[in-house]
Image (cartoon, rainbow, N blue to C red):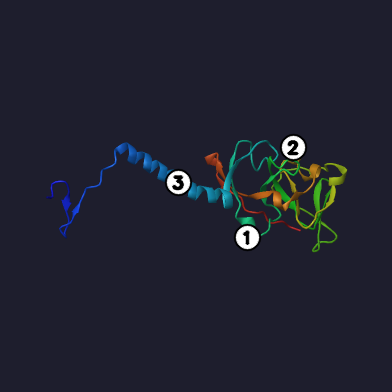
Amino acid sequence: MEQNGQQNGQGQIQHPSPKRSGASMFVWDLIKVFIISILIIWPVRAFVAQPFIVSGSSMEPTFHNGEYLIVNELDYRLHAPKRGDIIVFRYPLDTKEYFIKRIVGLPGERVKITGGKVEIFNNAHPRGFFLDESYLPSGDLTFPGTASDSDIKLSANEYFVAGDNRLASSDSRFWGPVPANDIVGRVSVRIFPFQNFSLFPTPTYKS
């Protein structure tokens, strides 16, 4: 008898599988999309890039409050941070907070605030040189913070950072250098507001 099934090419009987309802198929599709999204997005955010929103005015005019940035976390797995990179990092005095600043001093260097400018001493320039920071607002000066942070020698894993708005930035001039382990990544793209979409390459300094 073949009344309750379908006959295949070999004469065997196969019962037709029950069809899922439209609702159950929709729910299952949503679950699959969610799982796939997690498998794709989580590794990207954990190891490649993640979004941050600017809060405050310390990086003006480069960035403004409320702008939406993408931070590249992969770069620093391949090479060390460079002078001029804009980075997001964990605030050394409270690692639950995240700050955005620009790297001006590299590991092993001596950073000194002299005459309203950043002076760098390193192996290539033992007598020092002043940074030509063309990205700063016209006439913007870098004033010392506390006496101890106006002239500082960085260790092998420390970076000196400063905001582009030097008159309104809490940075290494006041609370010291940033340990390499606290750096999250380099700011590479501004994606919002859309009309201000732009990439941020590392500047080239004249010395």
Task: Name the secondary structure under disc 3.
Answer: helix
Ranked by sequence position, the earlier of labels 2 and 1 is 1
Pointers 2 and 1 in contact (C-beta within 8 Å): no
Q: In this orientation, which residue lies closer to the viewer: 54 or 118?
A: 54
Q: CA distance from mark 1 to mark 3?
A: 29 Å
For marks 1 and 3, give the one nearer the viewer: 3
Label 3: how many Cα within 10 Å (few below 14, some 14–19, many 20+) = few
The three-letter amino acid code for the residue at tag 2 is Ala
Task: Name the secondary structure under disc 2.
Answer: helix
- Number of marks present in the image shown: 3
Q: CA distance from mark 2 to mark 1?
A: 33 Å
Horizontal placement of 59 versus 35: left or right? right
Q: CA distance from mark 3 to mark 2?
A: 44 Å
Q: Find disc 3 in the rendering and name its residue.
A: 35
Q: Residue shown at 67%/48% (left/top)?
A: 87
The three-letter amino acid code for the residue at tag 1 is Leu
Horizontal placement of 158 versus 17: left or right? right
For marks 3 and 2, give the one nearer the viewer: 3
Q: Find disc 1 in the rendering and name its residue.
A: 78
The three-letter amino acid code for the residue at tag 3 is Ile
Residue 62 vertical position relative to residue 124 in the rendered view, above or below: above
Measuring from the top left, give residue 7's x and y in whole percent.
15, 54
Q: Find disc 2 in the rendering and name its residue.
A: 168
Ranked by sequence position, the earlier of labels 1 and 3 is 3
Task: Name the secondary structure under disc 1.
Answer: helix
